[in-house]
Image: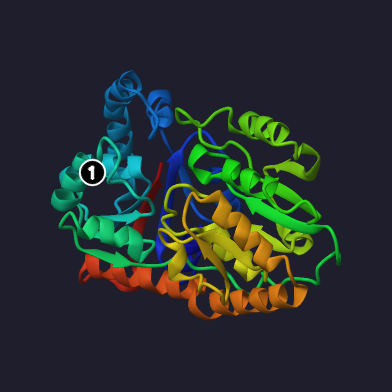
């Protein structure tokens, strides 16, 4: 939505097509982004990385209706370019774009090589897309290894409205914050195990902000499992589950350290950058896109992904003094402000789309944005 707002401000005509279920359509409309419903069907919405063969077969059958719905939408919108966001929308736009004779651009924000359908996705990218944009160099390398040229447009962040206030507390206990979607690969269980292994004389509290969001197979029941793990580790009295939070501002200000525990590489790691912008020192895995913006020992600490003992040791090292944490948090905010403003991301995406449109009026282009 940040990118689309930037494109609209630059006088582009944008139409955001989203599945009819969920809150993103309303959120985009509230920000002045033109939206429409794209009907995908229940089976296709639920298919994901943990789906079995039967679920995938059902989603394949449902894809015909989704392709028809998209084709109908695109004919009415008459876009100069289709700007696709999300793995499902990539595959479906690949089926539609050649018949509509509209250039197709994918903005990829995930690692996909290990997924079952990866060969089809890479083949579709080679034969139906005009350009692939990646949100990190780590993601770009995966696609380049399969012979697909990629441009990188790192995630950007709005700086003007992100000012932080002084911390709400001082002294013990040390307050940790972990946020994100409660999905199996996000590693909140790793964070719990690392905290449980901290020295007995360290007084701490952990708040987890986030909840189950995906409707896809394998993403339900995560919160209950995490609550059970906290009880088993006998730290339930120190852990608070805040659920889905619309405004993280008070949580940023109440925290001393941000902990990130993903057990699979983050394509970028947006929430880590948001914590840095809130002047929090971050402790995060040294994998995926995170090392592209977190400088180990300057903005935060990086540890080997999946190693809860290394995460524990990193926590112990930052727990030793508030002065060091404050210096690290200040450096973190400066890093994001200087090198990752949203304006730079919008400019990069705009330039890429303009190159694809190739000769059409840059200031009056029509862009159909799809996400699934």
Eyeballing the image, is 273 above or below 251?
A: below
Residue at 69 percent across and 36 percent down: it is: 233
**Image location (x, y in percent) of residue 306:** 49, 49
**Image location (x, y in percent) of residue 22:** 55, 37
Q: Residue tagged by mark 1?
A: 121
275 to the left or right of 118? right
Q: Nearer the viewer, residue 198 or 323?
A: 198
The reply to whether residue 64 is visible in this rendering is yes
**Image location (x, y in percent) of residue 323:** 75, 78
- When asked about the image quadrant of residue 141, the answer is bottom left
Residue at 23 percent across and 65 percent down: it is: 356
The reply to whether residue 260 is visible in this rendering is no
312 to the left or right of 64? right
Q: How is the image coloured?
A: rainbow
Please identify the quadrant where the C terminus is shown.
top left
Q: Nearer the viewer, residue 265 or 305?
A: 305
């Amino acid at each position: 939505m940040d990118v689309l707002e930037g494109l609209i401000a630059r006088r582009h005509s944008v139409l955001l097509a989203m599945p009819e279920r969920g809150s993103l359509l309303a959120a985009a409309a509230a920000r002045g982004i033109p939206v429409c419903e794209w009907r995908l069907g229940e089976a296709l919405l639920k298919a994901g990385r943990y789906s079995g063969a039967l679920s995938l077969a059902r989603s394949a059958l449902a894809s015909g209706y989704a392709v028809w719905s998209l084709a109908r939408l695109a004919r009415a919108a008459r876009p100069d370019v289709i700007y696709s966001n999300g793995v499902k929308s990539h595959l479906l736009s690949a089926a539609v774009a050649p018949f509509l004779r509209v250039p197709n651009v994918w903005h990829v924000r995930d690692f996909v090589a290990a997924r079952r359908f990866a060969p089809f996705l890479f083949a579709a990218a080679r034969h139906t897309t005009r350009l692939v944009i990646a949100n990190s160099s780590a993601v770009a390398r995966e696609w380049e290894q399969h012979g697909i040229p990629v441009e990188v447009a790192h995630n950007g962040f709005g700086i003007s409205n992100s000012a932080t206030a002084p911390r709400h507390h001082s002294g013990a206990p040390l307050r940790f914050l972990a946020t994100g979607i409660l999905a199996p690969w996000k590693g909140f269980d790793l964070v719990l195990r690392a905290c449980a292994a901290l020295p007995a004389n360290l007084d701490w509290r952990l708040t987890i902000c986030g909840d189950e969001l995906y409707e896809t197979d394998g993403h339900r029941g995560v919160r209950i499992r995490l609550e059970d793990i906290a009880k088993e580790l006998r730290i339930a009295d120190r852990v608070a589950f805040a659920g889905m939070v619309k405004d993280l501002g008070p949580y940023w200000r109440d925290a001393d350290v941000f902990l990130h525990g993903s057990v699979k590489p983050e394509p970028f790691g947006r929430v880590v950058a948001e914590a840095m912008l809130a002047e929090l020192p971050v402790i995060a895995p040294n994998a995926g896109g995170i090392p592209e913006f977190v400088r180990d020992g300057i903005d935060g600490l990086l540890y080997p992904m999946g190693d809860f003992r290394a995460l524990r040791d990193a926590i112990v090292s930052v727990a030793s003094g508030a002065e060091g944490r404050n210096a690290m948090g200040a450096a973190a905010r400066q890093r994001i402000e200087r090198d990752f403003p949203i304006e730079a991301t919008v400019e990069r995406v705009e330039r890429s789309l303009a190159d694809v449109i190739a000769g059409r009026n840059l200031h009056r282009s029509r862009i159909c944005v799809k996400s699934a």
